[in-house]
Amino acid sequence: MQEILTALCDSTRRAALAIVWDGGEHCVCELMVRLDASQSRMSRHMKVLREAGLVLDRRDAQWVRFRRNPDLAPEIMAVITAVLNAEKLLEQEMA
């Protein structure tokens, strides 16, 4: 659980997680553009999410594609969904 909380404490990682949480597969190049991050920075963030078990990765030529880990415990999925929803509400209130 500590690794998951550490992974969630960074806003860039939460934003990346929100993108892949849709159930689709997303190339690191897409995440870089959408989050305005360099390839090395994005790769470091995704490594933290992968090591926490939140995402899975697959190499596709020179890029890596990420997706939500479908084998997460329902309780963990619920916590992450709640965190992402709360952040989305905060963003809407700030706009």
Image: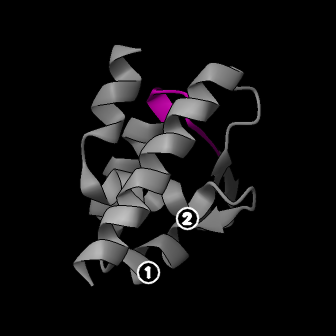
Q: In whole angstroms, how far apart are the C-alphas of marks 2 and 1?
A: 9 Å
Q: State the SS at label 2.
A: helix
Q: Are marks 2 and 1 in contact (CB under 8 Å)?
A: yes
Residue nearest the observer in this picture, 4 or 49: 4
Q: The disc labelled 2 sits on which kind of residue?
A: Ile
Q: Which residue is mark 2?
A: 19
Image point 72% across, 61% down: which residue?
Answer: 25
Q: State the SS at label 1.
A: helix
Q: Is residue 23 left or right of residue 45?
A: right
Q: The disc labelled 1 sits on which kind of residue?
A: Arg
Residue 42 seen from this side: yes
Residue 7 falls in which quadrant of the image?
top left
Task: Identify whether 42 is placed above or below 78.
Answer: below
Q: Decide whether residue 55 is among the magenta residues.
A: yes
Check the image and name the residue furthest to the top: 1
Image point 23% across, 77% down: which residue?
Answer: 94
Circle 2 Cα neighbour tier, 10 Å, few/some/many (<14 / 14–19 / ≥20):
many
Image point 69% across, 60% down: which residue?
Answer: 22
Q: Decide whether residue 45 is among the magenta residues.
A: no
Residue 43 seen from this side: no
- Tell me, for residue 76, which label it has, or none: none
Task: Identify whether 60 is placed above or below 10.
Answer: below
Q: Position of residue 86 (x, y in %)?
A: 40, 52
Q: Which residue is mark 1?
A: 34
Q: Position of residue 61 (x, y in %)?
A: 68, 66
- Give the quadrant of the C terminus: bottom left
Task: Identify whether 76 is placed above or below 58.
Answer: above
Q: Is residue 14 left or right of residue 17?
A: left
Which segment did they paint magenta?
A: 50-56
Task: Identify whether 56 is placed above or below 20.
Answer: above
Residue 23 falls in which quadrant of the image?
bottom right
Q: Is residue 70 left or right of residue 64?
A: right
